[in-house]
Image (cartoon, rainbow, N blue to C red):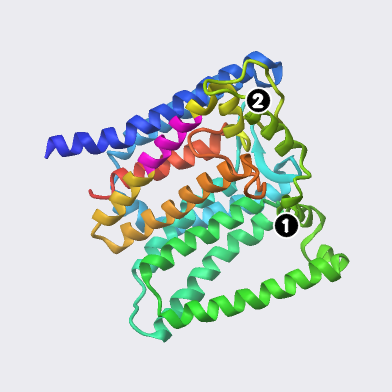
């Protein structure tokens, strides 16, 4: 039994530590290239240390109590999303951060955890078995997801909203609603998207009035990414193309290299070899979480892991895809690799819960 537990820990922590080492090396290299990044290595090191401290103290928490108070965490997070609209700091067009001088805090990142926690707890207690009960579940879950999405829409933060609905999708997968609801939801989405695209192509002025200039810009960037008209993407692709199997000696500036374009920056620093190491590390983590999902016996635990997996997998595919010019740029960091305090801490909180779900 102890041997099996040791294998599971190695399965998780070896790829995790590899990603952390690559992340810190990237921050160190970035710090050497300019004063604007000189503190990134120290700050990222602190976030990782806090993350491992969270994993340690989670061993002493009763996970059942955390789920029991999930509604309270959800409400507190909603209040933080409201407050940040009034007192937050605007970065890259989004008013999404509380600035405390030495560090910043992003409530929309924390909502990924509190939403998964509350939805999995709420859904696990709701009755199912017929189309009427499934309707109650869907309406309740969609409303719980829409409330934070509305406030994040006002920031705006496109990536976070997509993640919230992916978390909801992960919950629905485990709940297994009647197939008729999938058809109904698909029809509703089709009508909504049809109206949206009609306004986008034939009445942009009205669409801008409805969703705002900043959010329209983000949507427009997603829909027009195939043109390749992006300075960030151009620099990323040039940097990747100039790299050898073990890196690129000639530094090429990439905007947002430590966050959104961390893959391009990693390839520039460590070459295709480094990219393969990153891919293998994420593959091992993904299979670990799939294993946890399949082995879990509690419906609530399955929902929580499924919600996390949907979020975790999408972040990988989207970030790597947009670095390679295959997917639109939506400003989504790569877990455990991109620079960012709140994002890093939130993923460690997820890990802390998942590691102790069996308790």
- On the rendered structure, is 258 left or right of 211? left
Which residue, given by chain and number where applicable, does mark 1 sit on? Answer: 223
- Nearer to us in this view, 48 or 317: 317
Q: How many marks?
A: 2
The quarter holding residue 254 reads top right
Residue at image x 50%, y 36%? 344
- Circles 2 and 1, Cβ within 8 Å, touching? The answer is no
Q: Which image quadrant: the N terminus?
A: top left
State whether residue 92 is above or below residue 123.
above
Q: Is residue 284 magenta?
A: yes
Residue 353 higher or lower than 266, as above or below: below
Q: Is residue 219 left or right of residue 314?
A: right
Task: Name the residue beneath numbered marker 2.
Answer: 242
Per the image, label 1 sits on a secondary structure element best described as helix
Mark 2 to mark 1 CA distance (whole Å)? 28 Å
The percent position of residue 25, horizontal first and vertical second, equals 52, 20
Q: Classify residue 136 by image quadrant.
A: bottom left
Q: Which residues are magenta?
A: 275-285
60 in relation to 23, above or below: below
């Amino acid at each position: 039994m102890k041997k099996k537990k040791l294998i599971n820990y190695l399965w998780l922590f070896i790829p995790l530590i590899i990603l952390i080492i690559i992340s810190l090396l990237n921050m160190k290299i970035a710090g050497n290239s300019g004063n604007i990044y000189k503190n990134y290595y120290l700050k990222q090191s602190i976030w990782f240390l806090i993350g491992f401290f969270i994993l340690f103290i989670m061993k002493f928490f009763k996970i059942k109590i955390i789920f029991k108070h999930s509604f309270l965490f959800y409400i507190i997070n909603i209040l933080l999303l409201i407050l940040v609209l009034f007192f937050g700091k605007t970065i890259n067009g989004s008013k999404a951060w509380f600035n405390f001088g030495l560090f910043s805090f992003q409530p929309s990142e924390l909502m990924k955890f509190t939403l998964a926690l509350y939805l999995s707890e709420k859904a696990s207690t709701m009755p199912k078995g017929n189309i009427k009960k499934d309707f109650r579940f869907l309406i309740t879950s969609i409303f719980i997801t829409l409330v934070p999405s509305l406030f994040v829409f006002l920031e705006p933060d496109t990536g976070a909203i997509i993640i919230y609905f992916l978390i909801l999708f992960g919950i629905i997968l485990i709940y297994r609603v009647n197939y008729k609801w999938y058809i109904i939801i698909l029809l509703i989405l089709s009508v909504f998207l049809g109206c949206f695209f009609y306004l986008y192509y034939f009445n942009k002025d009205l669409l801008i009035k409805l969703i705002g200039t900043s959010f329209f810009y983000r949507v427009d960037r997603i829909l027009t990414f195939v043109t390749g008209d992006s300075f960030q993407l151009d620099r990323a692709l040039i940097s990747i193309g100039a790299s050898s199997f073990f890196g690129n000696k000639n530094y090429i500036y990439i905007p947002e290299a430590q966050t959104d374009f961390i893959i391009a920056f990693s390839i520039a620093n460590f070459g295709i070899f480094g990219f393969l190491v990153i891919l293998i590390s994420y593959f091992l983590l993904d299979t670990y979480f799939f294993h946890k999902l399949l082995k879990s016996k509690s419906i609530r635990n399955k929902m929580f892991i499924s919600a996390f997996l949907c979020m975790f997998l999408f972040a990988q595919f989207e970030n790597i895809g947009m670095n390679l010019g295959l997917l639109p740029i939506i400003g989504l960091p790569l877990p455990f690799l991109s620079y960012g305090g709140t994002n890093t801490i939130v993923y460690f909180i997820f890990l802390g819960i998942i590691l102790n779900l069996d308790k």
